[in-house]
Image (cartoon, rainbow, N blue to C red):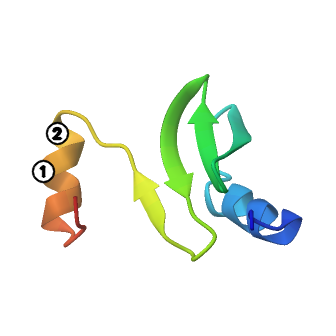
Amino acid sequence: MSLSNEQIEHYRELFSGVPDITARRMFGALALYSDGTIFAVMTKDGTIRLKGVGDMIARFESLGMEK
């Protein structure tokens, strides 16, 4: 089962401040892109996985996020 249209809209609203956001369904999940670069994947169970590089990895860890 894939994400519903309501779930997809919720995730898009969650990241509404991100410029040039697009979404694409992938493997039962939803990939979010900004300016063509993937930055997050959302699963149907509500898990959000953010892509972190450089200084963002340490910032995510300091917030208690899991790898």
Quadrant housing residue 34: top right
The answer to whether residue 18 is seen in the rendering is no
Question: Residue, x 19% and y 73% (percent of image)?
Answer: 64
Q: Which quadrant of the figure contains the N terminus?
A: bottom right
Can you say whether 51 is above or below 53 in the image? below
Can you say whether 26 is above or below 48 in the image? above
Tell me the distance, in whole angstroms, between the alpha carbons under discs 2 and 1. 6 Å
Q: The disc labelled 2 sits on which kind of residue?
A: Asp
Disc 2 is placed on an element classified as helix
Is residue 38 or residue 27 the one in the foreground?
A: 27
53 to the left or right of 32: left
Question: Residue, x 72% and y 37% (percent of image)?
Answer: 22
Q: Are marks 2 and 1 in contact (CB under 8 Å)?
A: yes
The answer to whether residue 58 is seen in the rendering is yes
Is residue 5 or residue 14 the one in the foreground?
A: 5
Q: The disc labelled 1 sits on which kind of residue?
A: Ala
- Give the numbered dot on residue 55: 2
Can you say whether 30 is above or below 64 in the image? above
In x, y percent, where is residue 32? 61, 43
Is residue 2 or residue 15 the one in the foreground?
A: 2
Question: Residue, x 47% and y 40% (percent of image)?
Answer: 39
Disc 2 crowd rating (10 Å Cα; few below 14, some 14-19, many 20+) is few
Q: Which quadrant of the figure contains the C terminus?
A: bottom left
Q: Which residue is mark 1?
A: 58
In this figure, what is the number of numbered marks?
2
